[in-house]
Amino acid sequence: MKFGIVVFPGSNCDHDCYHVIRHVLGQEVDFIWHKTDKIGQYDCIILPGGFSYGDYLRPGAIAHFSPVMKQIKAYAEAGGLLLGICNGFQILLETGLLPGAMRDNAQLKFICDYVYISIANNNTPFTKQCSNNQVLRIPIAHMQGNYYADERTLAAMRDNGQIIFQYCDASGNINDDVNPNGSVGNIAGICNKQGNVLGMMPHPERCVEDIWGSADGRFIFDSIIRP
């Protein structure tokens, strides 16, 4: 399987993703520079975490206008697998490839910690190696991870199975006490209606080997790779 990792000025998780894909999972992978106006043939493209363009204006707002994004949109609209992690999720929201928006964390603080997330829908290319309600332990690192959508949008997302991950406790309980950033509905990740575009705030690329304290992020990558 061949992956592409888009690199924006300020990306800082691009090499983490590269390490996981090439050295841990043994898959083909290329970096895709943000000024590229043509992209090659890929089975999955990743928008990595970081601070694209220094998060000026708001996270992902300037990256939305990078030359590569026109091709990324066309790729996604044609059914290509597209994974946005943290800042990549924010970029997907800014481009309109996913619904909703991000606000500052409710505590107005940057959060860097392990959290638990529950699998709300395992019927996607990104979660098919998981079971519904399975709990994963995955790190987060963000200041603007407070996901918001209005009630009408949320209702449509629930009906379409677009809510993929929700913050929970180690036993899978979902409530305000275990919501690290104030996201509506404890939402940690969503997909588009077609299911080929996923955005998530937690960093699966930072937990694919036991030496890192958890290897649960591997479920996400294995789901993408395995038929």
Image (spheres, rainbow, N blue to C red):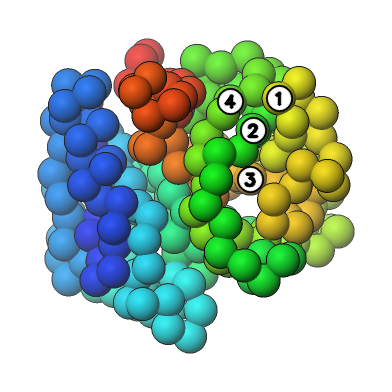
Q: Nearer the viewer, mark 4 or mark 3?
A: 4
Residue 65 horizontal/vertical position (percent)? 35, 77
Q: Residues within 10 Å of mark 4 (few under 14, many from 20)?
A: many
**Does 120 sit left or right of 177 as displayed?**
left
| Residue kind at label 4, given as amino acid type | Leu
Do labels 2 and 1 touch, CB within 8 Å?
A: yes
Note whether 83 is above or below 37 in the view shown.
above
Classed neighbour count for the residue bearing mark 2: other residues with Cα under 10 Å, few (<14), some (14–19), many (≥20): many
SS of the residue under disc 1: loop
Judging from the image, what secondary structure is the residue with disc 2 in?
A: strand
Amino acid on which disc 1 is placed = Ala
Of badges 4 and 1, the one in the foreground is: 1
Decide if residue 157 is on the left or right side of residue 193: right
User: How far apart, in angstroms, are the residues tagged by discs 2 and 1?
Assistant: 6 Å
Q: Quadrant of the C terminus?
A: top left
Task: Provide the residue designation for mark 1.
Answer: 170
The image shows residue 38, relative to residue 19, as above or below, that is below
Structural distance between the alpha carbons of marks 2 and 3: 10 Å
Q: Mark 4 touching mark 1, by CB under 8 A?
A: no
Dot 4 corresponds to which residue?
136
In which quadrant of the rendered view does residue 145 lie?
bottom right
**What amino acid is found at the position of numbered circle 2 in the picture?**
Tyr
The residue drawn where x is 71% and y is 25% is 170
**Tag 3 residue:** 188
User: Which mark is on residue 116?
Assistant: 2
Distance between mark 4 and mark 3 Cα atoms: 12 Å
Q: Are marks 4 and 2 in contact (CB under 8 Å)?
A: yes
Q: Residue at x 55, y 39 (%)?
A: 114
Q: Earlier in the sequence, mark 4 or mark 1?
A: 4
Q: Determine the CA span between mark 4 and mark 2.
A: 6 Å
What residue is rendered at 76% in x and 24% in y? Answer: 172
Instruction: Tell me which amino acid carries mark 3.
Output: Ala
